[in-house]
Image (cartoon, rainbow, N blue to C red):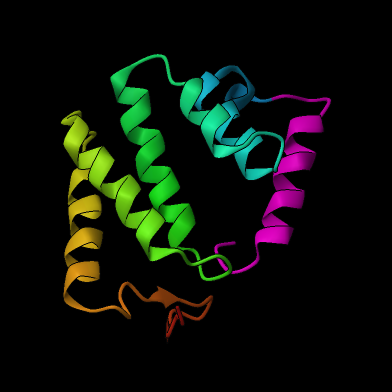
Amino acid sequence: MLGDYEAARDVYSKWLESETPDWRHEVPLFRSLVQYLSGEEDEAALLRRCDSLKRLSMVHYCLGLRWLAPDIRDRDRAKEHFEKYVDLGVFSFWVIYRATGFLGQMEQDPSRPQYADSDGEQTEVED
């Protein structure tokens, strides 16, 4: 859903309103991210909800991805969040490799990273 923010927002809003909550409703970080993605909360509120460095670092990574999405593409804001993720020094599994990879791509080539469409074909993303 990286390419269709309105559709994604609708899906997240419906999930929050669901009368049959699943395990994700009980995970505070996941719920906060969904509230942000649904438009229920802004970025500052999402960051304030982070009650540990681990959660804060993961939110910075997720925000970096969000700002790279083709529908809102803001490379400067994405880069800022990836850099904050790295600077916090709290690395989760493979995420550090993805974050530093995005930063490296952004440094080398303003058209990077590119996204794959639903058929797996590379899609150029305009700034």
Residue drawn at 37 percent across, 25 percent down: 55
Viewer-closest of 46 and 98? 46
Q: Is residue 29 above or below residue 6?
A: above
Q: In which quarter of the image is the N terminus?
A: bottom right
Q: Is residue 73 left or right of residue 11?
A: left
Q: In this view, does 8 lie to the left or right of 23?
A: right
Q: Position of residue 33 (x, y in %)?
A: 55, 35
Residue drawn at 42 percent across, 74 percent down: 115
The main secondary structure of the magenta stretch is helix
Q: In this view, does 59 lie above or below 4?
A: above
Viewer-closest of 46 and 9? 46
Q: Where is residue 14 in the image (x, y as percent from the top left)?
A: 79, 41
Residue drawn at 32 percent across, 50 percent down: 80
Determine if the magenta segment contains residue 106.
no
Q: Position of residue 44 (x, y in %)?
A: 53, 32
Q: Position of residue 28 (x, y in %)?
A: 54, 19
Q: Report if residue 58 is visible in the image.
A: yes
Q: In this view, does 119 lie to the left or right of 106?
A: right
Residue drawn at 20 percent across, 28 percent down: 90
Q: In this view, does 119 lie above or below 31?
A: below
Q: Report if residue 94 is visible in the image.
A: no
Viewer-closest of 8 and 50? 50
Q: Is residue 22 above or below residue 80?
A: above
Please state the extent of the stretch shown in magenta in the rendering.
1-21
Viewer-closest of 110 and 65? 110
Residue 123: quarter of image: bottom left
Residue projecting furthest to the top = 51
